[in-house]
Image (cartoon, rainbow, N blue to C red):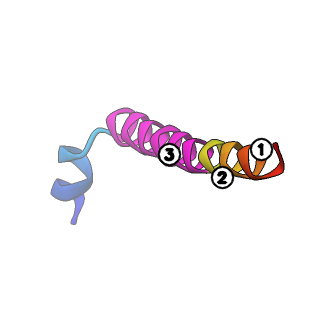
Amino acid sequence: MDAIFAAVDLAEVATWVAATGVLVIGITMAFKGIDLGKRGVKKA
């Protein structure tokens, strides 16, 4: 078990998790922007 923890660099894992979170939030915001655009076109 110690060998597994020694092989995994926590800084690398933290960077990967942060990058994945930013990507997910970016995709969510893009879809939200598309929905807001559609709503604006319907009201116009």
Q: Nearer the viewer, mark 1 or mark 2?
A: 1
Spot occupied by residue 35 in the image (x, y as percentages of width and height): 66, 52
Q: Residue lying at the far bottom in this picture: please name it.
A: 1
Region in magenta: 10-31
- How many numbered dots are placed on residues in this image? 3
Kind of residue at disc 1: Gly
* Residue occupying image coordinates x 21% and y 66%: 1
Give SS at disc 2: helix
Instruction: Answer with mark 3 or mark 2, whichever residue precedes in sequence.
Output: 3
Which residue in the protein does label 1 denote?
40
Which of discs 3 and 1 lies nearer the camera? The answer is 1
Q: Which residue is mark 3?
A: 27
- Tell me if 31 is positioned left or right of 44 in this view: left
The amino acid pointed to by label 2 is Asp
Left or right of residue 32: residue 17 = left
Separation of disc 1 and disc 2 at Cα? Answer: 9 Å
